[in-house]
Amino acid sequence: MPNMAVFDEARAQEIIAEHIGLEGPLLPILHAFNEEFGYVDDAAVPLIAQALNITRAEVHGVLTFYHDFRRVPAGRHMLKICRAEACQSRGSEDVARRCLSELGVDWHQTTRDGELTVEPVYCLGLCASGPAALLDDEPLGQLDPKKLAGAVEEVCGS
Amino acid sequence: MTRIFIPKDVAALAIGADKVAKKIAEIAAARRLDVTVVRTGSRGMFFLEPLVEVETAAGRIGYGPVAPADVPALFDADFLNGGAHSLRIGRPEDHPYLARQTRLTFARCGITDPLSLVDYAELGGWRGLKRAIEMGPPAIVNEVTQSGLRGRGGAGFPTGIKWKTVADTQADRKYVVCNADEGDSGTFADRMVMEGDPFMLIEGMTIAAIAVGATKGFVYCRSEYPHAIRTFNEALRLARCGGWLGPDVAGSKHSFDIELRVGAGAYVCGEETALLDSLEGKRGIVRAKPPLPAHKGLFQRPTVVNNVLSFAAVPFILAEGGKAYADFGMGRSRGTMPIQIAGNVRYGGLFETAFGLTLGEIVNDIGGGTLSGRPVRAVQCGGPLGAYFPPSLFDTPFDYEAFTARDGLIGHGGVVVFDDTVDMAQMARFAMEFCAIESCGKCTPCRIGAVRGKEVIERIMLGTNVDANITLLEDLCQTMKFGSLCALGGFVPYPVMSALRHYPEDFRPRAAAVAAE
């Protein structure tokens, strides 16, 4: 997940135009913003509202309902650590705690150098191979604190 | 040329399957050996992943779990001809884990290239659809009804009745929606289908569309499954090119196409009405029923909403007949269930079998007990909203009604094992916390109750007015169970109350227990 483009209105209008023909286009549009810019800028909300002929409040409501849609840019890389029961039973909470403390962040936060954002995730479908995480697009299983730290270092540099 | 099969299922990738594949290709090239690596889905034996299979004169021979460092030794042991090695497991289908299963839905998974239309057709694909086209809509619905198939998402509603309701409802257009928002911890069967045998899901949905007269389908997949999304989108493209989707499905004059939509991290969207609102571009808020989605579903049109596994069971039912499917199972739970054995378990994986095995057989005989080697203390069945079962209830047969009778649910078939280090008060607290995070906010018992429930359990854990707070917690659970609009708030009492009932000692503060001695 490389760092994203700066928000720009012309590109925003293109994204909206690309998806507006879909049935129920709002989620695909918000996903596309998230992917292109790394977040959904506040400035996008009135553009989307106007294009879909709904209120800004409705767009805001959807944007804030779903965990995936970011309203501020994330770090250059994204680490999602599973906190669901199956991973817990295999010691994920300890792995997560150690990782957060080594990075000096809490859940949902980004490291000070802007390299890595850490988010909790509730199940990656790797329930017999936990503790599990997703580092950008790379799945990680059978994690221990050392293995996770190594994977993070490989992606972010030391 | 020797064909080597290596899974690209995300559970294999997570533990190095790509590195193993790369190493095998490198060494084969260096030694000038003529090999082709085929990437497959997973057999579902995750304790053997990455599982490498080689096509030999004696059939496919498996080696696993293979680490990249093992690869040179495998070549030295002549694994390309099935040579002996400590990782050799023989023919995978003879492995006890697979030999004991009845694989109807997962018959192809792990064997074929998931994106090969040729492989799919060669191993029985499209036979169900072809027969469905010949027999016509009313006969399809009859066949599915006769099979006894019940919704595999968790609710267990008879699929045939749902389809008949949609078929009998008049409308300008109808939809088929597949719920692939597999958010339950301990479950991965939907993911495996989408990654390992995606054409089967396409075939099942197409049969449903023909049965009810729908022209458009949606698959709503959770965003936490990026690999499944990629594979399934590619499968859709290939199916369209092959004429299996589009204006004239397989030359039948039926028009049907499928679009994959991605969720956005909201667990509640696994509830069918919240899912429909989400597809429409709204907040994933649960709708009050009635009207049923079968009457007024997506965009107020009649809609079949089924889980991935329900649709995935349909091609077999149509190809072999409803009776062939109903011959498996017990009581009112007919057919097979892909049980997902997960958590702290030695032999975790997918185990498809007829209903009726006991929980103890699943956990101990098949799962081999805990991975940590410590005693099993609790097993959570049916996801984060499922009850915890202690070993004293291990005689419970895996069957919708038997689980209900013991205040549990089989849900989507997830079985999560915990050893004796688990703190059940902590797990109860987690259940409430999860519900608070994921509540859609429409109904008060769930929205407020989950927050209060977490607070009350925290007070109990601190030893504050324990008896009074336990009474309060029980009362709150009753309110949530009977007052919530959907299963999120309505079922979160299952893990909480089962923890309280079966593990009361965990709800007494340790200091007090020591003082009492």
Image: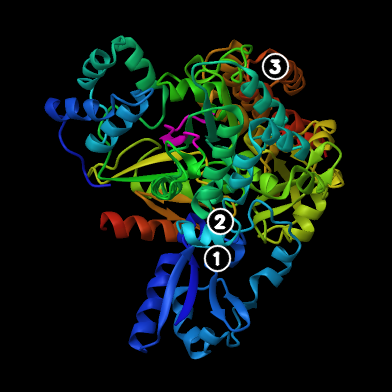
Given contact means CB atoms under 8 Å apart, are the residues at marks 2 and 1 in contact? yes
Mark 2: few, some, or many residues within 10 Å (few <14, many ≥20)?
A: many
Q: Nearer the viewer, mark 3 or mark 2?
A: 2
Q: Chain of mark 3?
A: B
Crowd tier of the residue under label 3, counting other residues whose Cα lies within 10 Å: few below 14, some 14–19, many 20 or above: some
In the image, the segment drawn in magenta is: B253-267
What's the CA distance linking mark 3 and mark 2? 35 Å
In the picture shown, does residue B377 fall above or below B383? below
Q: Which mark is residue B476?
A: 3
Please, is residue A58 above or below residue B395 in the view?
A: above
Observer-nearest residue: B235 or B220?
B235
- Which quadrant does the N terminus of chain B fall into? bottom left
Q: Are marks 3 and 1 on the same chain?
A: yes
Q: How many marks?
A: 3
Label number found at residue A129: 2
Looking at the image, which is closer to me, A45 or B418?
A45
Instruction: Note whether B39 is above or below B299 in the view shown.
Output: below
Judged from the image, the secondary structure of the residue bearing numbered disc 3 is helix
Identify the amino acid type marked 3: Leu
Identified by mark 1, the residue type is Glu
Residue A45 % position (x, y): 25, 18
Q: Which residue is mark 1?
A: B49
- What numbered label is drawn on residue B63? none
Element type at marker 2?
loop
Q: Position of residue B447 (x, y in %)?
A: 56, 16
Q: Is residue B449 left or right of residue B474?
A: left
Q: Position of residue A51 (x, y in %)?
A: 24, 16
